[in-house]
Image (cartoon, rainbow, N blue to C red):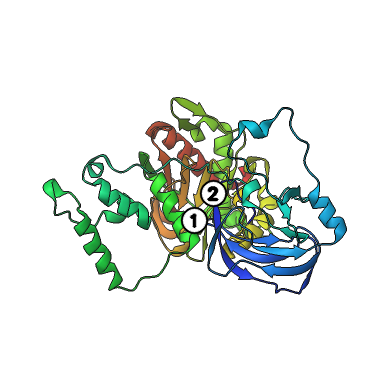
């Protein structure tokens, strides 16, 4: 199991595309896996013949687990057996846990590590030589009040089942001062078994985890209305035609380029300023949401963005967006108006400060002082959700007003 994303620790086998005895080419996708962010492919380290497949569909494997063996040529075997340059000094003595194995590491062209065992078979890759990156978001703290009402025994049972304090929010504790007892927990779990229950998909669990971490911050949402008639008129002149979300993303990118401090993150007592205006676009995928990120969006025209955006949306709906393509954004745009929703308070991702939401457009009568009459106008509600530690209402309001100004003057986009 290769590490297909920076914070990936494990993945679920979705499909196995080859059988033992089949000939394969170098970098051929042979196994499809699902992480909490995307569906991706595991490829062969070299050409050869599939010797065995160790993996099973629907099972979860950690990074470094052997999924199968390729019977390699002598040339490929020799290539993988090449030892990396040894560092100066006896590093092995400084690391008591280090164990010498019969297998020797190698590196394929894409940087993934593999082993050659005593049978001359290339394994993908070995746990001993591939340590998963455990970096991720900050752990979700238990609420201050709830923390005092969960006994060590209850916490141990929660850890065993992979539960969080949010999962216990619906339990009325019967213990002293409302404490949730182990009996309360087991009664609750027993009640679940009487209902229709199935395992959450990796992407659903990933979204849930991200939202729990996001909600640990003080979030605020402000909103206003925007006239979409100029955008709709501008759109008629373009081929291909950008969607409203792309206009909004472009407007947000230009507004942030003028005031990049608005998207800065507060980490401890330090303000972290991004050097690039990378904007994500929320896309509904099967059983979850994916957020492909467009890099340096402020430097790209609407015309350049339209085609690449369509391709990103198609990949996202197939859950084929890699974690790298979803990482590093400073803000996200959510066009919840595509579902007929007029108003919403979407939650920014844990590593982002801002989320711009665009509601459904509808005709509304607006008073025109020059013509002294009500005139029809296509209006939509637009919201800005933000981490209140990093941005205040005044700064958020000025940013939102600038986005509205750009949307109502699309020639500037």
Q: Is residue 193 above or below residue 397?
A: below
The front one of 244 and 34 is 34
Determine which quarter of the picture holds residue 260.
Answer: top right
Residue 3, given in percent of the width and then of the height, sits at: 62, 51
Q: In front of the other: label 1 or label 2?
A: 1
Q: Is residue 177 above or below residue 125?
A: above
The front one of 35 and 237 is 35
* Residue count near mark 2 (Cα–Cα under 10 Å), binned few <14, some 14–19, many ≥20: many
Residue 155, given in percent of the width and then of the height, sits at: 30, 49
Residue 299, given in percent of the width and then of the height, sits at: 67, 40
Left or right of 310 on screen, residue 215: left
Q: Disc 1 versus disc 2: distance between alpha carbons?
A: 9 Å
Placement of the N terminus among the 4 image quadrants: bottom right
Residue 296, given in percent of the width and then of the height, sits at: 65, 41
At x 21%, y 45%, the residue is 149
Q: Is residue 32 above or below residue 151?
A: below
The front one of 146 and 343 is 146
Examine the rendering and report whether any part of residue 378 can be seen: no
Q: Check disc 2 and report its element: helix, strand or loop.
A: helix
Q: Which residue is mark 2?
A: 248
Examine the rendering and report whether any part of residue 411 can be seen: yes
At x 39%, y 56%, the residue is 365
Left or right of 196 on screen, residue 368: right
User: What is the residue that sits farthest to the right in this orientation?
Assistant: 75
Q: Which residue is mark 1?
A: 335
Left or right of 21 on screen, residue 197: left
At x 45%, y 64%, the residue is 339
Q: Is residue 90 above or below residue 22?
A: above
* Residue count near mark 1 (Cα–Cα under 10 Å), binned few <14, some 14–19, many ≥20: many
- Per the rendering, the mark at residue 283 is none
User: What is the residue that sits farthest to the left in this orientation?
Assistant: 176
Q: Check disc 1 and report its element: helix, strand or loop.
A: loop
């Amino acid at each position: 199991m290769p590490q297909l994303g920076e914070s990936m620790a494990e993945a679920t086998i979705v499909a196995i595309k080859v059988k033992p005895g089949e000939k394969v080419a170098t970098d051929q996708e042979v196994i499809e896996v699902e992480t909490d962010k995307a569906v991706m492919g595991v490829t062969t380290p070299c050409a050869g013949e599939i010797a065995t497949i160790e993996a099973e569909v629907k099972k979860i494997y950690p990074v470094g687990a052997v999924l199968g063996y390729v019977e390699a040529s002598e040339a490929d075997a020799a290539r993988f057996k090449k030892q990396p340059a040894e560092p100066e000094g006896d590093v092995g003595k400084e690391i008591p846990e280090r164990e010498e194995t019969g297998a020797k590491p190698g590196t394929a062209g894409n940087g993934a590590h593999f082993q050659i065992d005593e049978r001359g078979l290339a394994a993908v890759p070995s746990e001993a030589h591939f340590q998963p990156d455990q970096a991720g978001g900050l752990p979700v703290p238990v609420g201050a009040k709830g923390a005092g009402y969960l006994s060590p025994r209850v916490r141990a049972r929660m850890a065993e089942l992979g539960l969080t304090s949010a999962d216990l929010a619906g339990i009325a504790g019967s213990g002293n001062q409302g404490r949730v007892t182990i009996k309360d927990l087991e009664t609750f779990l027993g009640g679940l078994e009487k209902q229709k229950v199935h395992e959450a998909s990796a992407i659903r669990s990933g979204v849930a985890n991200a939202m729990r971490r996001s909600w640990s911050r003080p979030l605020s949402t402000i909103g206003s209305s925007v006239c979409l008639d100029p955008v709709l008129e501008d759109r008629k002149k373009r081929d291909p035609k950008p969607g409203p979300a792309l206009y909004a993303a472009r407007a947000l990118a230009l507004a942030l380029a003028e005031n990049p401090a608005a998207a800065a993150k507060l980490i401890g007592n330090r303000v972290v300023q991004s050097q690039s205006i990378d904007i994500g676009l929320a896309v509904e995928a099967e059983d979850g949401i994916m957020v492909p990120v467009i890099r340096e969006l402020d430097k790209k025209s609407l015309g350049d963005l339209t085609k690449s955006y369509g391709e990103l949306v198609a990949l996202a709906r197939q859950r084929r967006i890699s974690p790298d393509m979803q990482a590093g954004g400073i803000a996200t745009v959510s066009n919840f108006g595509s579902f007929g929703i007029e108003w919403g308070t979407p939650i920014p991702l844990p590593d982002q400060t801002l989320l711009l939401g665009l509601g459904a457009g509808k005709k509304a009568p607006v008073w025109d002082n020059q013509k002294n009459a009500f005139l029809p106008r296509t209006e939509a509600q637009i919201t800005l959700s933000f981490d209140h530690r990093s941005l205040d209402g005044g700064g958020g309001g000025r940013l939102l007003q600038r986005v509205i100004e750009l949307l109502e003057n699309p020639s500037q986009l």
